[in-house]
């Protein structure tokens, strides 16, 4: 009997339990749906706030659709005949299978579903990052992990994640770099503070950029095309640039970030890849950086301001001469191979010493003003004359880099910047301030294309060897210049004018 009773009781109990379980499951699902939907809605609005143009278009689109679907119907009535709003006719109208009504229903259905899926996805993403931080033990005292705030794709290979740190210092993130990299399964390029100190930005990259890449390594991987130089190793491989397409470039960055090394390897690349190149170097800092180029027959190095101004005005004269040639021959731009000219590169290391404003009382004031004017002119006009300018500078504000000059430079290499303002001046974004403290790591901007690169390292010894090879090539006659060096032309002109002046003087005195 007991068994029979039991047999009778068990199914009743079990069915009621099943009913309760079904009840609980339904409540749980509804709860989950509402929560996910809510998260989806908030996430959606967050996305829209980040993209105001899309948001405005969407709102107008929806308003238009509602207006189109319901004009002269319920929207109209709600406004003009509120008492006639909820009538049976109205309800029937909503249930009618008219195309615009069906479109609205579909929109509502897919909108809700989309927001639900968005909510679920963002919950799953948050869960994934929570697990990563738990496994790497990046938790605060109460077991709270950093929370994802923003995810942004920087380019094909890199994403930036911004987290609310929940009281965990950036230093602790840096200490856990190895663990985080293996959990994310991607290389971490940098850790930086976000908008506030309570946020941290992590840049993840699918490919790890090398922290050191030498000039010889990049040369082996990709030989230079005509009139080109190495920009560095990007995630896509070795990046080179044809100087004819720039035609001027700026190298900027804080002290010790790798400007001079990059500057010299650019010049080396150009010397190797351009058969007829005249290289002029202005090095006003100490005159030591560019000394090595002195032994080349096709280069000329100046170390003081008055000589620099003299050199620049000779280049300006050459530019005018070339313009005249273009005009006489009905041509648009100098092609050195066709027109019998040499390509000219004027390189200025620490250009702020040349163009930075000096007080009027300074003995070099006049030269300083003249240098600024000529540089401005050269940057503006020399595009068609096969004359290129390569500037390296630590300071980039308007007082040392006039807007006119800056506007005419389309190739920009930004190494680690000290400030957001410094970075913005060079590449129009703050990315250079966020770069990791790796020497030679920089952002290359040409036109609107941006690449993060590891600049090739060229040691002084190796540079010496490569320069010796070039000298030998000149001695063997394998390399030649088509023209006399510009400064020699100018010197000849000066001596001939002074000789002429002396003859005139002598004649005058004879008379
Ligand atoms: N691409 C690179 N790879 C590895 N190390 C580099 C690289 N570039 C520079 N370095 C290292 O950093 C040091 C400083 O570089 P560099 O002299 O080019 O800096 P800088 O930006 O010109 O500094 P300053 O503003 O003081 O002139 C170099 O001596 C070299 O050891
Ligand atoms: Mg330097």
Image (spheres, rainbow, N blue to C red):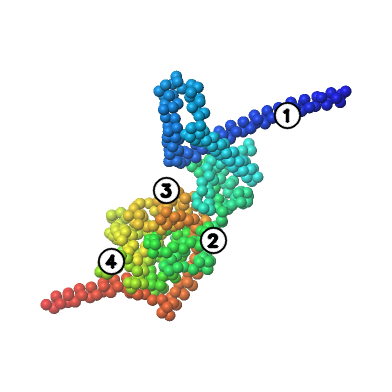
Q: Nearer the viewer, mark 1 or mark 3?
A: 1
- 471 shown above or below 195: below
Q: CA distance from mark 4 to mark 3?
A: 38 Å
Q: Residue at x 44, y 30 (%)?
A: 70
Q: Quadrant of the N terminus?
A: top right
> Hey, which quadrant is residue 330 in on the image?
bottom left
Q: Earlier in the sequence, mark 4 or mark 2?
A: 2
Q: Which residue is mark 1?
A: 18
Q: Earlier in the sequence, mark 3 or mark 2?
A: 2
Classed neighbour count for the residue bearing mark 2: other residues with Cα under 10 Å, few (<14), some (14–19), many (≥20):
some
Classed neighbour count for the residue bearing mark 3: other residues with Cα under 10 Å, few (<14), some (14–19), many (≥20):
some
Q: CA distance from mark 1 to mark 3?
A: 65 Å
Numbered label attached to residue 323: 4
The location of residue 385, given as percent across then percent down, is: 32, 66
Q: Which residue is mark 2?
A: 212
Task: Give whichever of 53, 399 is nearer the camera.
Answer: 53
Q: CA distance from mark 4 to mark 1?
A: 93 Å
Q: Which residue is mark 3?
A: 421
Left or right, 138 with reference to 262:
right
The location of residue 387, given as percent across then percent down, is: 34, 65
Left or right, 28 with reference to 118:
right
Residue 415 visible in the snapshot: no
């Amino acid at each position: 009997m007991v068994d029979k009773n039991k047999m009778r009781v068990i199914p009743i109990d079990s069915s009621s339990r099943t009913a309760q379980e079904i009840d609980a499951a339904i409540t749980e699902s509804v709860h989950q749906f509402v929560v996910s939907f809510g998260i989806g809605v908030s996430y959606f609005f967050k996305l829209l706030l980040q993209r105001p143009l899309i948001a405005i278009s969407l709102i107008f689109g929806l308003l238009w659709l509602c207006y189109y679907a319901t004009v002269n119907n319920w929207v109209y009535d709600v406004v003009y005949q509120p008492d006639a709003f909820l009538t049976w006719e109205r309800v029937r109208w909503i249930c009618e299978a008219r195309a615009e009504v069906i479109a609205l229903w579909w929109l509502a259905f897919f909108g809700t579903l989309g927001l639900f899926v968005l909510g679920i996805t963002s919950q799953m993403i948050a869960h994934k990052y929570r697990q990563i931080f738990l496994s790497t033990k990046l938790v605060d005292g109460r077991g709270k992990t950093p929370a994802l705030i923003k995810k942004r794709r920087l380019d094909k290979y890199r994403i930036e994640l911004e987290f609310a740190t929940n009281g965990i210092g950036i230093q602790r993130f840096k200490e856990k770099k190895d663990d985080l990299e293996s959990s994310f399964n991607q290389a971490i390029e940098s850790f930086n503070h976000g908008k506030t100190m309570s946020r941290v930005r992590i840049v993840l990259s699918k490919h790890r950029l090398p922290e050191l890449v030498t000039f010889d390594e990049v040369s082996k991987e990709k030989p230079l095309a005509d009139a080109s130089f190495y920009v560095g190793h990007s995630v896509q491989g070795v990046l080179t640039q044809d100087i004819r397409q720039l035609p001027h470039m700026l190298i900027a960055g804080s002290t010790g970030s790798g400007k001079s090394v990059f500057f010299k390897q650019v010049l080396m690349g150009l010397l190797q890849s351009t058969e007829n190149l005249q290289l002029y170097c202005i090095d006003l800092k100490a005159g030591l950086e560019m000394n090595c180029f002195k032994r080349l027959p096709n280069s000329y190095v100046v170390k003081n301001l008055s000589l620099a101004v003299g050199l620049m005005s000779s280049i300006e004269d050459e530019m005018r001469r070339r313009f005249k040639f273009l005009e006489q021959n009905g041509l648009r731009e100098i092609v050195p191979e066709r027109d019998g000219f040499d390509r000219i590169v004027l390189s200025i290391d620490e250009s702020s010493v040349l163009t930075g404003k000096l007080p009027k009382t300074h003995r070099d004031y006049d030269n300083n003003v003249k240098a600024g004017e000529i540089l401005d002119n050269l940057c503006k006009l020399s595009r068609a004359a096969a004359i290129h300018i390569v500037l390296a500078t630590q300071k980039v504000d308007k007082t040392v880099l006039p807007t006119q000059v800056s506007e005419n430079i389309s190739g920009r290499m930004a190494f680690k910047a000290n400030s957001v303002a410094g970075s913005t001046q060079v590449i129009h974004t703050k990315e250079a301030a966020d770069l990791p403290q790796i020497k030679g790591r920089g952002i290359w901007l040409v036109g609107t294309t941006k690449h993060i690169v590891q600049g090739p390292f060229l040691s002084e010894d190796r540079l010496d060897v490569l320069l010796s090879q070039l000298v030998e090539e000149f001695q063997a006659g394998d390399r030649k210049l088509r023209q006399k060096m510009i400064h020699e032309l100018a010197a000849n002109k000066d001596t001939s004018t002074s000789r002429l002046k002396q003859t005139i003087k002598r004649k005058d005195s004879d008379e």
